[in-house]
Amino acid sequence: MSDNATYKVLFVCLGNICRSPAAEGIFRKMVRRQGLKDKIEVDSAGTAGYHVGELPDSRMRQHGARRGYKFDSLSRKFTSCDFDRFDIILAMDDSNYNSILRLAPDLDSEAKVHRMMDFSKKYENDHIPDPYYSGTEGFELVLDLLEDSCDGLLDKVKKDLI
Ligand code: 4NP
């Protein structure tokens, strides 16, 4: 992360090998396409450290590649330092949301945390379901929900940048 970006976005799930690296890759591609690479920085993390240092799950990478995404960030654990480093923190589900909030040192930090599906434009789902023990359809659903919610999130970030 460089220090001169205007807005820093962090996606968080449990293991940081399926949902949040996919969100990172999808959002990064949208940011690049809109010429906002120098204005918006993107990262992801997991509330658990089971997979630290690993590439995203091979199934998530394969499903992403079919839609033209490259998910290649290495898993890391979310820490309370992330509240200082990022402007907005997106939780994939309620469990992630509560785990993040438990580490928040103050109200300003708490206010940075949002549920990813709050930015969805066309889906009623209230969370991004964990695909780890699911089949193909679980990974495809994650990508559908993330493409839509990333679109809505970028609208919000662009408004905040003005
Ligand atoms: P993620 O999926 O939170 O979307 O990265 C999971 C990855 C690993 C595990 C659970 C969920 N796990 O139990 O190892």
Image (tube, helix red, strand yellow):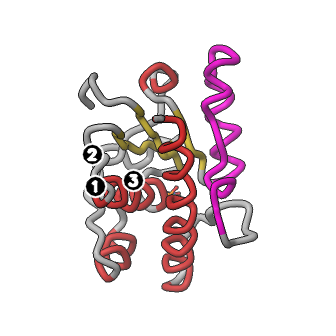
Q: Is residue 1 above or below residue 129?
A: above
Q: Which residue is mark 1?
A: 32
**Mark sitting earlier along the chain (3/1):** 3
The image quarter in which residue 101 lies:
top right
Q: CA distance from mark 2 to mark 3?
A: 13 Å
Residue 95 in picture, x, y percent from top left: 69, 47
Q: Nearer the viewer, residue 119 or 129?
A: 119
Residue positioned 47% across, 51% down in the render: 15
Residues shaded magenta: 93-121
The image quarter in which residue 23 lies:
bottom left
Judge whether residue 97 is colored magenta. Answer: yes
104 sits left or right of 79 in the view: right
Label 1: element kind:
helix
Residue type indicated by callout 1: Arg
Q: Which residue is mark 3?
A: 24
Q: Which residue is mark 2?
A: 37
Point out the image quarter for the N terminus: top left
- Tag 3 and tag 1, C-beta contact below 8 Å: no
